[in-house]
Image (cartoon, rainbow, N blue to C red):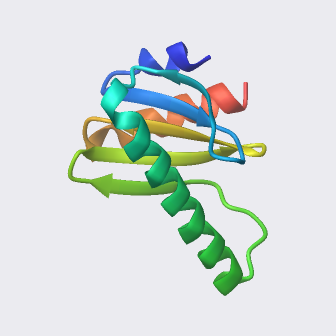
Amino acid sequence: MLDTLMAVRGMTHVLLIDHNGSVLSSAGLEPGLLKRELGLVAAGKAVIGSLQTTLDAAGWSELLLDLDSGPVLLTPFGPQILVTAFDDVTSLGRVRFAVRRLLNP
């Protein structure tokens, strides 16, 4: 499943994280980046939770983080979170399309 996303031009790595923060699957991830990505997901979940409470929103569809190391898109997939990291924000449309196609066949 994640190999399909890695074939998208500009994609650097992909992770599927469960609700406890454990990695279920990954592709393209350099060994030294795992701890950073898990911390990023935890922080992203905190921001999402805070925004949901503030806005009285039941759900969320995605969170884009534009970091110095490149953009990261967090997308809910049931109780899991799909993390897609890519080279440049100009690739966002292509990445969103690939993620939606994968999650909603």
How many numbered dots are placed on residues in this image? Answer: 0
- Answer left or right for 16 relative to 91: right
Percent from the top left, x then y, of residue 71? 33, 47
Q: Nearer the viewer, residue 103 or 78?
A: 78
- Answer left or right for 104 relative to 1: right
Percent from the top left, x then y, of residue 96? 50, 39
- Answer left or right for 71 relative to 41: left
Percent from the top left, x then y, of residue 19? 72, 47
Q: Nearer the viewer, residue 68 or 7?
A: 68
Q: Residue at x 26, y 44 (%)?
A: 70
Q: Residue at x 68, y 75 (%)?
A: 52
> Can you say whether 92 is above or below 57 in the image?
above
Percent from the top left, x then y, of residue 4? 53, 15
> Can you say whether 18 is above or below 25 in the image?
below
Position of the N terminus, as image quadrant, is top right
> Can you say whether 41 is above or below 28 in the image?
below
In the image as oriented, which residue stretches furthest toward the left? 68
> Can you say whether 29 is above or below 95 in the image?
above
Position of the C terminus, as image quadrant, is top right
